[in-house]
Image: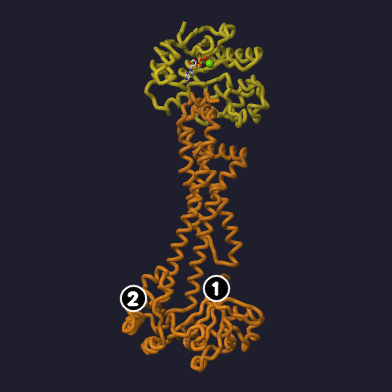
Chain colours: A yellow, B orange
């Protein structure tokens, strides 16, 4: 479903120093897969994730979703693809603190361009119930625990029925027990609902839960 | 459309969280709109006031003044130049279609006192025709008559509003004396008030005396202007030519001008219009300053919300969605200031209306709201564009 071929990412540090953050990455992720991307800190995992999620552009190489090749597309098209295909889950949750839990979960539907084939409110309430967040609808993110915040983030990632979820160290800011719960939740989503999940982690024990592991070091797949 | 409503709601929610900042930011626009609307209201009031004053003088009134007409129109020329005398008046009075002719000498801003009170009033020294020329109507006593003029009697006619400033009632004032710069005059007539505003400069603020009674103030026995009435509007051009011909024999044709009072009124109001426009333009600068205040705070807001912008972009927001979000905020801030400014000016105008006929017309309202939303757009678009153009990845990683 997702294929990357010969992806490179370079950062210009000074006018003549170039940092090669990703080197010739080629990989394919199939529909319904649960893939873990592991590697030490600074190895380029997040950079890769952002490129897969169309938040960042590679310096060279191509990305395709199904038969659709993403190259030379406008910023608006990228936004639309992010809206319709990807659901992000971040290490720092990245909820908007001035919006309530319910508003945060509904936010992606505000930016939807296509006509939704579901009722956003109903779906949000369903997700809130499913993730054990009842009663928190009108609370603000900084008033709930980290584990709850990450569940809100997952609900937000799911509301648009994305093709896949990109989770970048979703347990990084959580204690071990809560982290395990979040991973369990993602595993369930993958098994019960066949949602494709790409999980970035530097924790090998978490990576063991995935069916496939892609190891990355110094910007290269090893 | 839905998204605009969403943007408005989030802007209002943000303002509710930052009430103090919102009010202070709107204050700049509030002051600008207040200044522009109030000055417009005063300008309109002044114009109406001048119009009323001239109207009370009646139709077909002509004025001969020293100076070139073009200079007069620009407001100069009232001082200096030639002065007219008895010979001119006599010759002009013979023109067939002139019904009344009053040569005038004026002692402006004279100290008038009686009964222990002092007022500053213009003294007009003229002949018995002055009552017809100035449309004076008697309320008590009598108008100036030919015999008063011939004798140069120390008598005067005053408007009832001013008579009452010295004496409790009109009838008590009649026959009493008034002191004009140390000269004692007897009140022989009290005229009906022509009304007008409560501020100085109205047609009631004159006392009329026989010409010869003021020789002390006017040793040369000259007139500063000659007022006359023409029997019929159609005869005005012919009479004007005749007057020019007669005076042209003695004076240079550029040394004096013959004007219809409507012309004079137009020239005076055009001067006020210019002054008012300049004042409004100056006030408009404060609107621009208010706009810069909004731009400033919007830049701060954008910087504070970089991460939020990144999150929204990751969730599918387009550049234009972000642009609109911030533009709507800037416009609301600006329109809020505009509305408050308008309300405050309305309250002020209501308060001063008993003293001065200022009024706010619909064009001022439209202008104030139109200009303030325009300012929101113009000054909001730069910060909003900055927000929209942030790279999503840099924004979301911003700490
Ligand atoms: N915007 C950037 N400019 C320069 N270097 C960057 C930038 N973003 C990331 N890097 C560098 O790229 C490397 C990979 O970063 P990242 O993908 O965040 O690693 P990981 O997520 O595996 O910890 C790091 O060495 C990081 O310093
Ligand atoms: Mg990382």
The image quadrant that residue A16 belongs to is: top left
Residue B204 visible to the viewer: no
- Nearer to me, B257 or B345: B257
Closer to the camera: disc 2 or disc 1?
Answer: 2
Q: CA distance from mark 2 to mark 1?
A: 34 Å
Q: Chain of mark 2?
A: B
- x, y (%) of residue B389? 45, 31
On what subunit does the disc labeled 1 rest?
Answer: B
Residue B49 located left or right of residue A58: right
Quickly name the residue at label 2.
B254
- At horizontal 62% and vertical 22% (from top left) the residue drawn is A149
Q: Is the residue B46 above or below the residue A215 in the image?
A: below
Q: Residue furthest right?
A: A135
Left or right of residue A128, residue B232 in this image: left
Dot 2 or dot 1: first in sequence order is 1
Please, what secondary structure does the residue beneath circle 2 have?
Answer: loop
Q: Position of residue B204 (x, y in %)?
A: 55, 77
Label 1, ligand 1: CB separation under 8 Å = no
User: Can you say whether B239 is above or below A65 in the image?
Assistant: below
Residue under circle 1?
B196
User: What is the x, y in percent for residue B396?
Assistant: 52, 25
SS class of the residue under badge 1?
A: loop
For the residues labelled 2 and 1, say whether their Cβ atoms are less than 8 Å apart. no
Quadrant of the image occupied by residue B24: top right
- Residue A3: image x %, image y %? 42, 13
């Amino acid at each position: 479903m997702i294929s990357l071929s010969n992806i490179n990412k370079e950062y210009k540090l000074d006018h003549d120093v170039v940092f090669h953050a990703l080197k010739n990455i080629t990989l394919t992720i199939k529909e319904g897969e649960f893939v873990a991307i592991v590697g030490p800190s600074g190895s380029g995992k997040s950079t890769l994730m952002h490129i897969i999620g169309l938040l960042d552009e590679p310096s060279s190489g191509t990305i395709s979703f199904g038969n659709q090749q993403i190259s030379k597309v406008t910023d608006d098209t990228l936004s639309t693809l992010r809206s319709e295909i990807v659901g992000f889950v971040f290490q720092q949750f990245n909820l908007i603190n001035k919006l309530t839990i319910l508003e945060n979960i509904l936010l992606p539907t505000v930016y939807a361009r296509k006509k939704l084939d579901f009722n956003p409110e109903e779906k949000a309430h369903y997700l809130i119930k499913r993730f054990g967040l009842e009663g928190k609808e009108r609370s603000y993110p900084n008033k709930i625990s980290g584990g709850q915040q990450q569940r809100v983030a997952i609900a937000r990632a799911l509301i648009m029925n994305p093709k896949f979820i990109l989770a970048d160290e979703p347990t990084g800011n959580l204690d071990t027990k809560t982290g395990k719960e979040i991973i369990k939740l993602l595993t369930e989503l993958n098994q019960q609902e066949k949602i494709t999940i790409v999980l970035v982690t530097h924790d090998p024990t978490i990576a063991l839960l995935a069916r496939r592991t892609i190891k990355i070091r110094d910007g290269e797949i090893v | 459309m839905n998204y605009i409503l969403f943007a408005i709601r989030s802007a209002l929610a943000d303002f509710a969280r930052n009430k103090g900042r919102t009010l202070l930011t709107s204050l700049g626009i509030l002051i600008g709109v207040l200044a522009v609307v109030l000055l417009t209201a005063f300008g309109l009031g002044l114009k109406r006031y001048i119009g009323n004053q001239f109207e009370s003088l009646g139709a077909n009134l002509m004025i001969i003044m020293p100076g070139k007409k073009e200079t007069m129109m620009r407001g100069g020329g009232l001082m200096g130049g030639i002065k007219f005398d008895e010979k001119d008046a006599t010759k002009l009075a013979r023109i067939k279609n002139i019904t009344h002719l009053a040569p005038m000498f004026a002692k402006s801003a004279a100290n008038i006192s009686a009964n222990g009170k002092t007022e500053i009033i213009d003294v007009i020294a003229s002949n018995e025709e002055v009552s017809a020329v100035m449309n004076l109507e008697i309320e008590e006593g009598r108008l100036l008559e030919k015999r008063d003029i011939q004798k140069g009697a120390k008598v005067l006619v005053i408007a009832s509003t001013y008579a009452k400033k010295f004496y409790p009632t009109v009838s008590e004032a009649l026959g009493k004396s008034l002191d004009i710069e140390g000269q004692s005059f007897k009140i022989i007539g009290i005229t009906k008030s022509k009304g007008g505003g409560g501020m100085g400069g109205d047609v009631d603020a004159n006392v009329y005396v026989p010409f010869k009674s003021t020789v002390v103030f006017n040793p040369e026995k000259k007139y500063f202007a000659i007022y006359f009435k023409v029997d019929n509007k159609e005869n005005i051009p012919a009479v004007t030519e005749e007057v020019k011909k007669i005076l042209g024999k003695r004076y240079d044709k550029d040394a004096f001008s013959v004007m219809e009072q409507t012309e004079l009124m137009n020239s005076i109001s055009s001067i006020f219009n210019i002054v008012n426009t300049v004042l409004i333009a100056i006030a408009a600068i404060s609107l621009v300053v208010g706009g810069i205040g909004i731009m400033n705070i919007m830049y701060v807001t954008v910087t504070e919300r970089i991460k939020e912008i990144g999150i929204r972009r990751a969730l599918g927001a387009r550049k234009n969605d972000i642009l609109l979000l911030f533009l709507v905020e800037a416009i609301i801030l600006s329109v809020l200031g505009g509305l408050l400014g308008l309300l405050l000016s309305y309250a002020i105008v209501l308060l001063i209306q008993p003293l001065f006929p200022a009024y706010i017309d619909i064009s001022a309202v439209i202008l104030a709201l139109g200009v303030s939303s325009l300012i929101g757009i113009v000054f909001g678009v730069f910060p909003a564009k900055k927000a929209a153009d942030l790279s999503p990845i840099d924004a979301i990683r911003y700490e």
